Amino acid sequence: MVNRKDWSNSSSNYQNGNFANITSNEGGNAIETDVENKCYENVQNIRTNDIKIEDLFYFVLQRTSKSYLYEEEYKQATRNITKAKDVAMQAENKSKNRYKGMVPYDDNRVKLHVWDADRETDYINASFIDGFNRCQAYVAAQGPMENTLNDFWRMIWQLKTMKIVMLTNLTEGSGRKCMQYWPDEESVDFGKINVQLIQTDQFSDFTIRTMKVKTNDCLDEGDSRVIKQFHFTAWPDKSVPRYSSSMVHFRHKIYTTKEEGNFSGPLVVHCSAGVGRTGTFIEIDFLVKQAQAQGTVNVTSCLEILRNQRILMIQTLDQFIFVHEVLVEALTCTTSAVSARDFQAEYRKLLTRDPKQKKTLLYTDEITYAIAKETGNRDNNIYCNILPACVVENGNSSFNFYLNIPFFFWKTKITMIEAYKENDAFIITQTPLENTNVDFWRMVYQYDVSSIVMLNTLSQMKDNERYWPQKGNVFKCPPYEIQLESEESFGCCEVSKLILIYKEEQRMVRLSRAHYWTQDECVPKSPLHLLKHVELLQGWQTESGGSNPVVVHCMNGADRSGLFCVIAAVLERTKIEQDVAIEQIVRQLRHRRSQIIPDLEQFRFCHETLLAYLNQNDTYANF
């Protein structure tokens, strides 16, 4: 049983302090006693059949093989609830609801202040939702419609909300899911609210927009507010994101982004209807906070509480299962980043020997547990065990696929790999064979690639497998022709500027061949040359526009290519966030190709490379 005095003790785990200091509003008034009591009852209810964090992994593992257990729990939590929704169904409000029946209950709907009685009502399709230790911690809202844009911003201003979580794209498939409620460039008025876009930060699975918001009657610039919108862009409607680590990272970003100003309004969360994806995110956030405070979670009881406050919260069984997967990732895996300043000390700890297991902590880290089991066989430079996580035809998957070109049907193993800010920054693949050279160049042409990174040695390739011309020659693989424009040595790599010709079109492609990685080495002798190679590549990408993927290949398309991409992604994050998150990035990239970082030696090399980067020119002083 949780009692009220315990909440203040756990307030350090949360952004908004203890219960006694809560001043969350509905219609601008202080929380009434009955609302406070209801929030307290909600926290009491979630104590039934809690799962200890140390048991969570095995709890979820059991249900992975016995999916009917998930189904039973979901049905238990989603029984019909009959509560009044009269206000939402009034004639003047029906047009403000995107989907019939997906409307707020009367008892906890958000009531807007009416600024213009002739044009406005107090209705918006949004519900207050209690958090673990805070009443009305969230607002679950429908995505704005054309006729509710002004209402949405009235709500944001009235509730003093500083952060908005958006979980839908504006359009999905052929349907409009949400109206754009922020400007692209110039400031825009939404009724009496003026919104100006200040900054946009793009990441692989989400975008952060910073907006300055004020009312049109504000005379003092100090009366404006800076509001952050966190827009998750990789969540299909009525489905779930591809991997849980992206959601863990997204949530971490929300809570580590500082608010500007002294306001502490509720977190506004919306998708399209404000129920499925919105409910999933709120439950994840609720339960992570519960776990931090109490060491337990209860997904089913939490869902019952959410459903009592808004209809259809967590709309599908897949979303219910996804909550469990994210909780495992967030609560049982080492996902937290280390500040760049502290990385050297933390790495020393990982190299400390565990007296019981007589191994270093780095070895016993869970990341080594998931090493690919198959060793595979090599036949004519084809590694049969190195396959993308899933393979489909016609390019329907956004990362692992066969390519299907009109009049040609051919197959090549390729995997799209993300960097920190670009979703499909790299294409990793095996070194082409003589009979796949045309496939390789077709891929380069189709994806408008301007940079190729070769990580195997020439001695590992047969003479007839070379896919670029030597000096004075032209390499032909119809319908493509490749010419050599120039060659230059950078110490770490040899760079050939190539001209790719298809029909009347010509494109420049840089091929950089690594000189720092011998045939028999699992990792390079020193990280410095690899660091230089990555930095050169980043410069070339910036020069060419930086939006198209880089092709990275090695003999099997996994071990060397994967290590290169992991280090590039970790470096990019470190420069932006001033932290180091090697394990988190390895885990996320392994969802796309499981053989990435296949052994402890490569995992350790990732750490050594980041340490070398931070030690260069006293980089620590910049953090």
Image (cartoon, helix red, strand yellow):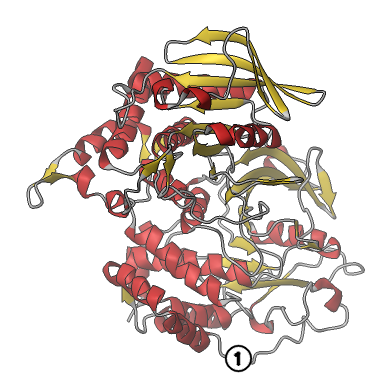
Q: In this view, does 30 lie to the left or right of 247?
A: right
Residue 429 vs residue 44, the one in the foreground = 429
Q: Which percent across, then down, holds residue 482?
A: 67, 20
Q: Is residue 421 left or right of residue 85?
A: left
Residue that sits furthest to the right in the current view: 118
Q: Mark 1 points at which residue?
A: 80
Q: In this view, does 143 lie to the left or right of 533?
A: right
Q: In this view, does 90 lie above or below 452?
A: below
Q: In this view, does 122 lie above or below 515?
A: below
Position of the N terminus by quadrant: bottom left
Q: What type is the residue that disc 1 sits on?
A: Asn
Q: Residue at x 38, y 76 (%)?
A: 65
Q: Which percent across, then down, holds residue 267?
A: 58, 60
Q: Is residue 296 visible?
A: no
Q: Can residue 96 be seen in this view?
A: yes
Q: What element carries label 1?
A: loop
Q: Which percent across, then down, holds residue 293?
A: 34, 65
Q: Quadrant of residue 562?
A: top left
Q: In this view, does 408 lie above or below 280?
A: above
Residue 402 vs residue 369, the one in the foreground = 402
Q: Is residue 93 left or right of residue 208?
A: right
Q: Which residue is drawn at 57% across and 81% down?
A: 307
Q: Quadrant of residue 46?
A: bottom left
Q: Quadrant of residue 556?
A: top left
Mark 1 nearby-residue class (10 Å; few <14, some 14–19, many ≥20): few
Q: In this view, does 528 lie above or below 380?
A: above
Q: Which percent across, then down, holds residue 553?
A: 49, 33
